[in-house]
Image: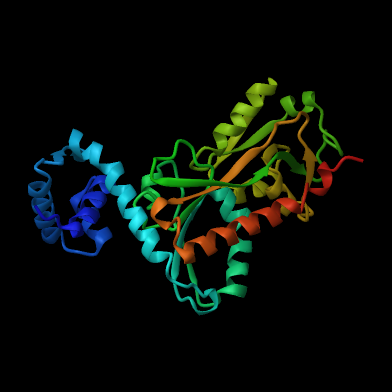
C-alpha cells in the first residue's frame, strides 16, 4: 500500500488545533479541502482519528499514539531540508511573530527590536499576547516563532531554553512619609501595596516568594500591566514589588525611589520556547541566538542602583 505523505501535515494540524477550521487556516487551504484530506487520511490509517465533540475534535487512541511519531518524523524532515538553506539576516524580509509576556515586552523587546534593526533592517516583528494558554499564542501550532517569558509545563513539541534570571525590588514615591532609603520588614507589612496581575505565571512566583519568607502584604489595588504601577505609586503612599529590571528602568523617574526588598525574595527565570520543527531552521536558530544574547546583556547590566550593597 502506498502512503500519501502530504496527508501527514493535515493530521498534525488537526491534532494540534483540535478544529477543522483552524487547521485549514493554518495550512492555507479551504475547509472543504481539509475535510476531504481528513477523509482520505482516515481511510489510509483505517481509523476515525478524530471525533467531533462539543469542545472540538477529540483524537482517538490511535491518533494519540501516532501523533508523537508523525510529529517527530515531520520535524526530522523539516530539519533535513531547512538545514540546507543559508540565511542572511541583512537580506531577510521575514515577518517574525513573537509572543512575549508583559515583563519581556517591557524589559527585552525594545532591545531585541533595536538589534534586529541593526542586523536585519528589513525583517518585520509582530507581537501577540502570551497569556495563560500557550495554544492561543500559536507557538504550539508553529505559526508563532517563539514565546518569551516563563514557560510552565510545556507540551512535548516545544523546546524550552533558559535565557536569564531576574530578582525583585520595591518602589515607593519620592518623599514617602515613612520610608526613606531602606525599608524594614515591619514597614513593608504596614504599607498598602499595588499588585500586578498580568496573564501568565509571574504573579504566582511573587506570591510564592512572599509566602516562603512569611512576608505579609495588604493589596490596595491590582492592575493588569507593569506600566500602570508607577503612575499609581507616584500619587499614593503605596508600595509595589516589581522585577528588578523593571525597577532599573524606573530608577530615573524623579517621582519614585527604588529600594531593595526587606528580605531576599529570590529570582525567577525568563525562558523562550519554540516548536520543535524550527530546531534546525537557520533563520530561527539565528533569531533565538539573538534573543539569548540580548537577554544575557540585559542581565549583565546588573542590579538597580538602590539595591547595590554599600
Give the quarter of the figure containing the C terminus: top right
Task: Name the spot of residue 223 as percent of width and height, x first.
Answer: 56, 42
Task: Name the spot of residue 254 as percent of width and height, x first.
Answer: 79, 54
Does residue 74 appear to the left or right of 259 in the view shown? Answer: left
Camera-nearest residue between 2 and 86: 2
Camera-nearest residue between 61 and 173: 61
Q: How is the image coloured?
A: rainbow
Q: Residue at x 31, y 42 (%)?
A: 68
Identify the image quadrant of residue 26: bottom left
Q: Residue at x 44, y 62 (%)?
A: 281
- Residue located farthest toward the bottom when viewing the structure as drawn: 91
Q: Residue at x 78, y 23 (%)?
A: 186
Task: Name the spot of residue 53 as percent of width and height, x first.
Answer: 15, 37
Task: Name the spot of residue 102 as percent of width and height, x first.
Answer: 55, 49
Identify the image quadrant of residue 22: bottom left
- Residue located farthest toward the top when viewing the structure as drawn: 214
Does residue 122 appear to the left or right of 227 in the view shown? Answer: left
- Residue located farthest toward the right when viewing the structure as drawn: 310
Q: Is residue 155 above or below residue 285?
A: above
Number of marks drawn? 0
- Residue located farthest toward the front when viewing the structure as drawn: 1
Camera-nearest residue between 179 and 274: 274
Q: Is residue 258 above or below residue 114?
A: above
Q: Residue at x 78, y 56 (%)?
A: 252
Does residue 308 appear to the left or right of 118 in the view shown? Answer: right
Amino acid at each position: 500500500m502506498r502512503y500519501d505523505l502530504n496527508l501527514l501535515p493535515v493530521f498534525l494540524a488537526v491534532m494540534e488545533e483540535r478544529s477543522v477550521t483552524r487547521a485549514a487556516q493554518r495550512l492555507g487551504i479551504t475547509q472543504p479541502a481539509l475535510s476531504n484530506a481528513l477523509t482520505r487520511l482516515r481511510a489510509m490509517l483505517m481509523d476515525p482519528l478524530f471525533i467531533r465533540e462539543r469542545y472540538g475534535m477529540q483524537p482517538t487512541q490511535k491518533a494519540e499514539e501516532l501523533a508523537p511519531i508523525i510529529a517527530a518524523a515531520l520535524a526530522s524532515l523539516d530539519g533535513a531540508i531547512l538545514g540546507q538553506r543559508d540565511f542572511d539576516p541583512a537580506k531577510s524580509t521575514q515577518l517574525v511573530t513573537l509572543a512575549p509576556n508583559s515583563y519581556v515586552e517591557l524589559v527585552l523587546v525594545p532591545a531585541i527590536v533595536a538589534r534586529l534593526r541593526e542586523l536585519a533592517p528589513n525583517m518585520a516583528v509582530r507581537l501577540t499576547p502570551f497569556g495563560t494558554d500557550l495554544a492561543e499564542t500559536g507557538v504550539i501550532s508553529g505559526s508563532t516563532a517563539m514565546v518569551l517569558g516563563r514557560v510552565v509545563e510545556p507540551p512535548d513539541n516545544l523546546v524550552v531554553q533558559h535565557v536569564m534570571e531576574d530578582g525583585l525590588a520595591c518602589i515607593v514615591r519620592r518623599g514617602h512619609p515613612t520610608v526613606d532609603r531602606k525599608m524594614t520588614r515591619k514597614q513593608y507589612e504596614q504599607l498598602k501595596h499595588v499588585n500586578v496581575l498580568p496573564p501568565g505565571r509571574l504573579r504566582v512566583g511573587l506570591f510564592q516568594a512572599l509566602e516562603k519568607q512569611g512576608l505579609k502584604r495588604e493589596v490596595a489595588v491590582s492592575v493588569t500591566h507593569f506600566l500602570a504601577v508607577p503612575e499609581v505609586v507616584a500619587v499614593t503612599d503605596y508600595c509595589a514589588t516589581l522585577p528588578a529590571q523593571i525597577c532599573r528602568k524606573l530608577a530615573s523617574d524623579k517621582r519614585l525611589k527604588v529600594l531593595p526588598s526587606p528580605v531576599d525574595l529570590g529570582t525567577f527565570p525568563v525562558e523562550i520556547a519554540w516548536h520543535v520543527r524550527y530546531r534546525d531552521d537557520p533563520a530561527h536558530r539565528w533569531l533565538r541566538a539573538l534573543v539569548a544574547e540580548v537577554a544575557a546583556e540585559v542581565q549583565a547590566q546588573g542590579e538597580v542602583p538602590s539595591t547595590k550593597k554599600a
